[in-house]
Amino acid sequence: MRQVHLYQQCSQIWSLRRTSALSNSSFSPFSSPPWLNIKYTKSFLSQKNKISGGGAMGTTELGPSDLRHVESMSHTPSGAGKINKLNAVILGDSLASEEDDLILPSAKFSQSALISSQQQYEKMYKKSVEDPAGFWAEIASEFYWKEKWNPNEVCKENLDVTKGQVSIEWFKGASTNICYNAVDLHVSAGNGDKVAIYWEGNEPDQDGQLTYSQLLDSVCQLANYLKEVGVRKGDAVIIYLPMLMELPIAMLACARIGAVHSVVFAGFSAESLAQRIIDCKPKIVITCNAVRRGPKVIFLKDIVDTALTESAKNNVSVDICLTYENTTAMKREETKWQDGRDVWWQDVVPNFPTKCDVEWVDAEDPLFLLYTSGSTGKPKGVLHTTGGYMVYTATTFKYAFDYKPSDIYWCTADCGWITGHSYVTYGPLVNGASVLVFEGAPNYPDAGRCWDIVDKYKVTIFYTAPTLVRSLMREGDEFVKRYSRKSLRVLGSVGEPINPTAWRWFFNVVGDSRCPISDTWWQTETGGFMILPIPGAWPQKPGSATFPFFGVQPAIVDEKGKEIEGECSGYLCIKRSWPGAFRTLFGDHERYETTYFKPFAGYYFTGDGCSRDKDGYYWLTGRVDDVINVSGHRIGTAEVESALVSHPQCAEAAVVGVEHEVKGQGIYAFVTLKEGVPYSEELRKSLILTVRNQIGAFAAPDKIHWAPGLPKTRSGKIMRRILRKIASRQLNELGDTSTLADPGVVDQLIALADC
């Protein structure tokens, strides 16, 4: 892999302008991390105790408390480097401009933060990597366990495929229940009247709420129904619901009785849903008749009907389809129905008792399956277990957002993705938080909807995707500034790296230059946050994921698997396991090992590229495999190619990802038609519709590029490197094409680029 200087690489990706770095850059990544050693010298404080706000933004006077705060963040072990030149702002004092390298937390925020200084982080992080068993056992003891783990066997792991089967276990032998920790404990502690879930519907006048006591009653009723129809511990349950309160209720009900839920995003097609039904063979499917998203009605029950018909053809039959009547979108009498299989939620669930015994499960018993895209075309069933996942998601939520019991928390993610599992449902509720669930579209009825909701519920923590940030940024500041947003105190970003321009708009406009941004990097497979800036603990660099969470030991390796120290670029791996790590791919442990552990023996391979700068900050540079990250949704190129080739007039297809202003990455498809089939706009639309129908609208190609042929080696391998350059219009960087079986095909593709 070609090594690129960090600043050059970031400039190519984001046109990032940075003006400072540690002058002393040699370090060992974990013995003495440089982010713990930053020294803010007197020259940094500038003449007359001023810090530049950048260009026309002017300067900000620092009072004595601010100076003491900066000095308190300046703890420097001997031999640390010094910052020679720096542009910085302090939260709440000035706008972050393009020239600002660091955004410092305000003294006021840090003083009340759970992690208030770099020294505190240093102490906790050091313990977490030197004694991970002791560190996590101490944290886990704050949760409820019916039976405790063997203190000598908190963690067992083997990440090295050369030493046997890969395995990860945390707290094995202990028994607990995540639903009990997320709901019952808060009611027993006298917090039953606290709001657990606020619900905002598609229309601004549609809303509702559930207290923790009401949530417990609803969960128990559904759990009792599931037991009545034969769902037992270890059985799979497919949940295909929009963001109604019934979605987290269904997840919790499954967890309460030890069933394994598999939530499928309600934007997936019938074919994608059928794939998941066939793979996990659920006892029951839970859905609703329809949902209204913006002005559009989506008939979910029809999609489920088609999926169940398809799965039956593959000898997987589901006896019960529990259907919630969503009256805001569709009337009951208009819903297609199959007697003997279909059951209305409202007709049965409310009739069951509001008390349901908890099924105590082993910490390593499965909690849920979540299917994610892979490079082979077949979705991967990521399996998370109970105990470690519970401890990790709750702990990361607590520190990543500096959670306080008075907070109103809103994550815009759907529960069909891992973010909705970890940071809409389990992480927040285990902490006893009040969570906002939103069913509608963020730009309906206009682009001010998010900020209207923030003001309506007095949201204090707002966690969303860079795609949404960029989309709302394009609409202009007016839609944001017409609302107060004074309740906000922490912002968050998830799904993909956020470019510095969007970061600054999020910080300056949405957060009024006073809210730290928790820019999180993690994956479906990791279960929870891995690299992020903990609010209040350290300065932030716009666009950087910052530093590892407790217990996470990142390593950047070259293509030969050699770990690189200091400032570098390479492949991001993780050295040791962490409690939230997934344990296997459902029914395919060999694929689990091949995909994640064989590329670099002894490491978990994330599949992401990463740079580390002179200050030790981590910068994620995107996927290095054949997975495209579209609006935070991971889509395998093989899945899209398979859908395109299923079209009767398509002979071959190759898909690559390209930069997209709003979605982060877009899907660019090169399509070769069958002999004699002419190019046409109608056919282009038909191909896109085929992908929409087979996978979902979010996977629809942004561009169909007609291809008389594809650039292949003599052995038949498609040279995707060349396709990416053509798609990105980097025609002067095509490189050597002499090894192609037909080099002339490249010129043909370039000629058809705008057709």
Image (tube, rainbow, N blue to C red):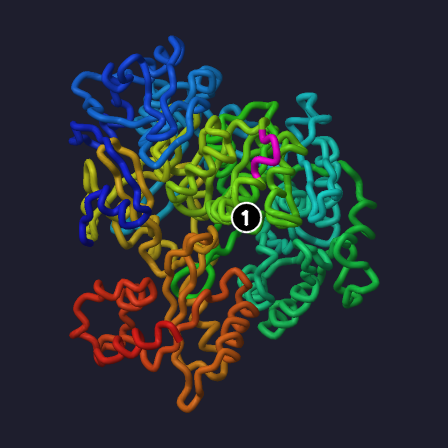
* Quarter placement of the C terminus: bottom left
Q: Which residues are magenta?
A: 480-485
Residue 502 in the image, given as x and y percentages of width and height: 43, 42
Give the main secondary structure of the magenta stretch: loop
Residue lying farthest to the bottom in this orientation: 676
Q: Taking the image as drawn, is residue 92 in sight?
A: yes
Residue that label 1 marks = 368
Left or right: 340 in relation to 292: right
Q: Is residue 438 above or below residue 456?
A: below
Residue lying farthest to the top in this orientation: 64
Q: Residue at x 31, y 13 (%)?
A: 49
Which amino acid, by three-letter code, is at mark 1?
Phe
Left or right: 479 in relation to 21: right
* Quarter placement of the N terminus: bottom left
Residue 199 in the image, given as x and y percentages of width and height: 69, 40
Residue 44 in the image, given as x and y percentages of width and height: 26, 20
Q: Would you say residue 659 sits in the magenta stretch?
A: no
Q: Secondary structure at mark 1?
A: strand
**Occupied quadrant, residue 236:** bottom right
